[in-house]
Image (spheres, coloured by chain):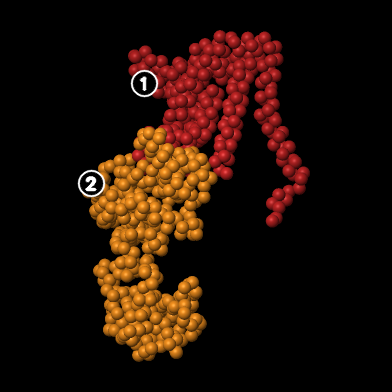
Amino acid sequence: MHVVVRNLNKNFGSFQAAKDINFDIQKGKLIGLLGPSGGGKTTILRMLAGLETPSSGDIYFHGKKVNNQAPQERKIGFVFQNYALFRHMTVSQNIAFGLTIQKRSKCYIESKVNQLIDLTGLTGLEKRYPHQLSGGQRQRVAFARALAPEPQLLLLDEPFAAIDAKVRKELRTWLKEMIQRLGVTSIFVTHDQEEAIEIADEIIIINSGQVEQVGTPMEIYKHPKSSFVANFIGESNTIKEISKLQGFEKYQNSGEAMIRPEFIEIFREDEVINRCTSQLGVVSNVVFKGNNWQVEVKVGDLNLVAYRPFEKDELTIGEEVWIYIHQVHFFEQGQSNVIKNRNILKKQYQQAIYSSNNYMFN
Amino acid sequence: MQNLNTEPLYIKRILIALVLIIFGFIFILPLVSIFIDAFSKGIELYVASIIEPDALSAMRLTLLTVVFAVPANLVFGVTAAWAITKFQFKGKNVLISLIDIPFAVSPVIAGLVYVLLFGVGGYFGPWLIMHNINIIFAVPGIILATMFVTFPFVARELIPLMQSQGIQEEEAAICMGASGWQTFWKITLPNIKWGLLYGVILCNARAMGEFGAVSVVSGHIRGMTNTLPLHVEILYNEYQFAASFAVASILVMLAILTLVVKGFIEWKHEQEQQRCGE
């Protein structure tokens, strides 16, 4: 289903939970509504479902305004954060609920329920009650129950929040595959950037009730429009006075800047290529991250977070190192500019660094 | 781990004994004495005082009152609990406090209020006389007074239960296309059935035994507006002790029956929870 939201507002008394929200969602896409807790994501989802009435603004499904449609008429599936399974019904009865409401034939209901139980891997648990299931199993039941009436739009509110970390990862991949296979337009709410990047086709970043940025995970990562987005998606260093850093001296009073850790390169004394373009710092912390080192370097009064490839030598705290900053982001009126270091480290070498730094999206 | 029960054994025994003695004197002894006194003049008199027309009429009236008051409060209680827990509206907290009024106000006052409203000198009195409707000193007044007194039982039982259950299951049902009515019957009612039954039983026990409010509005007309508790009082005031206790024993037995049913429901509910909770 094609979903369009225009100038959507929601006030709870004097608190504005959603401010002038606009976005378009193409049919069949999996969209992540990402933002910090209490930012209004769930309110937006509930307005799409019809469980909350917008204070102003319009919602269109398939080009048709649905503001005044009851939730029953919107053909949506909703997966609640705590699943809201019917506690007095078995797994099969839960999944069959939407179909019995539609007054489908017994035969149809039975085959549909069996099909969904197969699809969600719940075979053998049909007669269990919600209390007798694990978190992951409940999530699957909630998902199957929402899908049974064949909704045009699937809404998921923090679908993985109540599940422990290990199962969460499995379920994420499972859910993405399932949604892709069924081709149902889906919107899920999350505060976990990793989750959003991993499964969403497109991310809508929401902060204090406003849309900060819309785009594919890659676009948002590469070109964050605001320092909020830059900080929220991926690691970043926020720097007030960039002119103190080598290669960016001419950008005085240019406002806040952001540097991704992967664009800061660290050299030991014996590794440094061009001393004129690099800057001295002191290692203040080293954290082993599995496939690289996360190194904090103190440069003047700045503390910069950078990554160091695992194949290089380990650094020790207190060691003097040289750093080179490849690029910096500036934010001006909702736009970001990428500024490359004007002192070139060494042309060929630099290109090699770039390609290795983009590994996380390849 | 430190044992928190450090009291010596004798303190434990003294406390338990104290409770048993008080319980025996205040509850058990009076109940037993009712039966002893009821049968003091022989079983013939016991049976005679129960099947006497006035006693039978009192029993019928008590049952009639229960038949009207309990379902009315059942509907009211469910409606109030539903409104309070599922909707947001202004004055909700005031409404929650107002539901408790019958608990706070003396039943005598409750009865008097109805006399002031519907009695001959009351606000609606002249209009009611004109249209030949009797409320005070008639059955409708007794039912009204009983309803007033038993008003909070069902709602009080349901509100905390429904508050703890939240509204997500209902929302889930609505998203899947269920109407409000379907949601109530298929989702809400099965979730609250044990609490509801418990509330109804308490309400029922109180409706049968209510004395104060009913006493004010009934007029004590034998065979017409006497409920069981009023009949017991009348017999007692006429020094027919054996007969009075015989009728009282009926009330006691009804109360015990209520307790048994209540215990059974609690047991059944626990069983179901265990079955679901494993």
The quarter of the picture where the C terminus of chain B appears is top right
- B192 up-or-down from A35: above or below: above
Residue A323 drawn at (x, y percent) = 40, 83
Secondary element under disc 1, as helix, strand or loop, is: loop
Residue A295 visible in rendering: no
Q: The residue under label 1 is which amino acid type?
A: Phe
Pointers 1 and 2 in contact (C-beta within 8 Å): no
Q: The residue under label 2 is which amino acid type?
A: Lys
Image chain in red: B
- The part of the image, by quadrant, that contains residue A222 is bottom left
Nearer the observer, disc 1 or disc 2?
2
- The part of the image, by quadrant, that contains residue B187 is top left
Residue A51 drawn at (x, y percent) = 34, 45
| Horizontal side, residue B219 vs residue A262: left or right | right
Image chain in orange: A
- A138 up-or-down from B69: above or below: below
Q: Nearer the viewer, residue A192 or A40?
A: A192
Secondary element under disc 2, as helix, strand or loop, is: strand
- B255 up-or-down from A183: above or below: above
Q: Chain of mark 2?
A: A
Q: Which residue is mark 2?
A: A64
